[in-house]
Amino acid sequence: MEDIEKVVRDFGKVQEEVSKRIPTHYPTLKFPKSLLPYKKEVIAEAMKKAIQINPELSDLLGGSLVFLDGFIDDEEAYRENHGLLGETGYWKAIRGKGII
């Protein structure tokens, strides 16, 4: 049980940090897999087991599983994000909404 909790908690910390950087670093919601504290499969399995143990967490952890899907190959994540971040219109849009 402790391992499951640790994996879920450690991923939660990464999720929180990455979420803060979505507008300025990851607007495509694609994130470098190298940011993960464990292999993607290990995190997914821990979250699924945590849901089995405590079904009340299914909504929260289900959302985290969806977020986990956004972690892809580093180069691919960079390419996708860089393509959008290089667009002048993107910066105008988020500045106009007061995001940055």
Image (tube, rainbow, N blue to C red):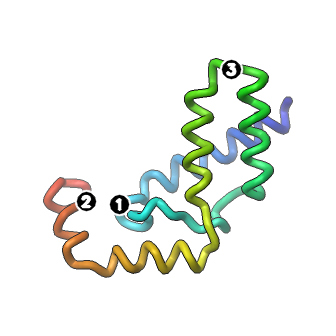
Q: Is residue 80 above or below residue 13?
A: below
Mark 2 → mark 1, Cα distance in angstroms: 8 Å
Residue in the picture at 76% in, 56% down: 38
In this view, the residue in front, 97 or 84, is 84
Mark 1 → mark 3, Cα distance in angstroms: 32 Å
Residue topped by disc 3: 55
Locate residue 88, reporting x and y percent. Answer: 21, 78
Question: Crowding at label 1, few (<14), some or many (≥20) Cα neighbours within 10 Å?
Answer: some
Locate residue 84, reporting x and y percent. Answer: 35, 74
Position of the C terminus, as image quadrant, is bottom left
- For residue 71, side relative to residue 16 (left or right): right
Q: Are marks 1 and 3 in contact (CB under 8 Å)?
A: no
Q: Are marks 2 and 1 in contact (CB under 8 Å)?
A: yes
Q: Is residue 43 above or below residue 30?
A: above
In this view, the residue in front, 67 or 15, is 67
Residue topped by disc 1: 23
Specify the amino acid type for callout 3: Pro
Specify the amino acid type for callout 1: Pro
Q: Earlier in the sequence, mark 1 or mark 3?
A: 1
Q: Earlier in the sequence, mark 3 or mark 2?
A: 3
Question: Crowding at label 2, few (<14), some or many (≥20) Cα neighbours within 10 Å?
Answer: few
Residue in the picture at 61% in, 51% down: 68
Specify the amino acid type for callout 2: Ile
Q: Secondary structure at mark 3?
A: helix
User: Quarter of the image holding residue 32?
Assistant: bottom right
Q: Earlier in the sequence, mark 2 or mark 1?
A: 1
Q: Is residue 51 above or below residue 37?
A: above
Q: Secondary structure at mark 2?
A: loop
Residue topped by disc 2: 100
